[in-house]
Image: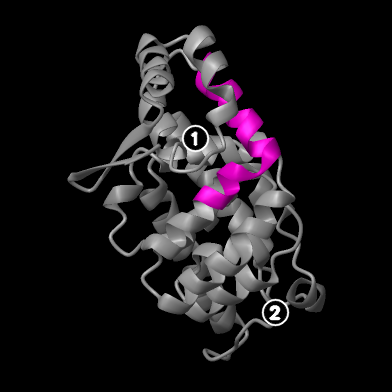
């Protein structure tokens, strides 16, 4: 069995364990510890595939539980917290986002929540806009940077994500603890599209005070060059869709 197959089986098993429909306690205060532990091992790649796997496992487990209990219409009360962030039911995705408390427990589930900014249901996108900044304030900044690094290079391809949703990510970047962590990650990353991430973060003033450090200390030459150019020209340029934009 490959590592990916093993991880898939672990995620499926953790979801089934979390979906204990016969337990009253699970309905009121669900225990998704196994799911959090399993997803902590997942790389932030192929998120579409992981979401489909999670969504299908939730649905199939619910159907199997309803069949065992002789009630096909049996519904679970409450929300399964981070697990329901990618539930097939838009009402449950919205409710999960609005009832989340505390910070994100790992990078994978925070990535699932960030992807709700591009959700196909308007109300879910609105819930993500309302809640994600608060969640970010309570989350380990390294978790947030992990997710920003896989989001900024591709967010222009998120067709349902508008300016309101992008503003939420920009506000995250301006949080002091996140700006500091982002600067450190940009400087020390030996590979990856750091110059692109730097440009997208440059929509805000979060990195302005770090330009000198980034220009002098960054491992990647392309980022050093871009930071020096920003210092020289007094502005940052980024690409949005097929158009160039800048701030100065």
Residue for point 69% across, 59% down: 134
Give the image location of residue 71, x and y in percent. Answer: 57, 91
Give the image location of residue 21, x and y in percent. Answer: 68, 75
Question: Which quadrant of the structure image shows residue 248?
Answer: top left
Report helix, strand or loop for mark 1. Answer: loop
Q: Which mark is residue 43?
A: 1
Q: Which residues are magenta?
A: 170-188
Residue for point 41% across, 25% down: 194
Q: Main secondary structure of the magenta part?
A: helix
Question: Which quadrant of the structure image shows residue 133?
Answer: bottom right
Q: Which residue is mark 2?
A: 78
On screen, 158 above or below 181? below
Foreground residue among 223 and 32: 223
Report helix, strand or loop for mark 2. Answer: loop
Q: Residues within 10 Å of mark 2 (few under 14, many from 20)?
A: some
Left or right: where 243 falls relative to 184: left
């Amino acid at each position: 069995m490959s590592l990916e197959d093993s991880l898939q089986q672990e995620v499926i098993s953790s979801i089934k364990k979390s979906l204990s429909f016969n337990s009253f306690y699970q309905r009121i205060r669900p225990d998704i510890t196994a799911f959090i532990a399993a997803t902590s091992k997942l790389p932030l790649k192929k998120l579409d595939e992981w979401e489909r796997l999670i969504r299908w496992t939730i649905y199939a487990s619910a159907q199997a539980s309803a069949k065992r209990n002789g009630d096909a219409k049996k519904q679970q009360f409450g929300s399964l917290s981070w697990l329901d962030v990618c539930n097939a039911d838009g009402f449950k995705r919205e409710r999960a986002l609005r009832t989340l408390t505390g910070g994100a427990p790992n990078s994978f589930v925070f990535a699932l929540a960030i992807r709700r900014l591009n959700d196909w249901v308007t109300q879910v996108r609105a819930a993500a806009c309302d809640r994600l900044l608060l969640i970010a304030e309570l989350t380990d900044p390294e978790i947030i940077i992990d997710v920003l690094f896989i989001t900024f290079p591709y967010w222009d391809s998120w067709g349902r994500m508008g300016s309101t949703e992008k503003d939420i990510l920009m506000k995250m970047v301006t949080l002091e603890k996140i700006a500091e962590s982002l600067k450190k990650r940009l400087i020390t990353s030996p590979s990856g599209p750091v110059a692109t991430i730097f440009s997208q973060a440059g929509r805000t003033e979060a990195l302005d005070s770090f330009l000198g450090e980034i220009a002098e200390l960054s491992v990647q030459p392309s980022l050093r060059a871009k930071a020096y150019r920003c210092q020289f020209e007094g502005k940052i340029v980024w690409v949005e869709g097929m158009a160039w934009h800048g701030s100065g």
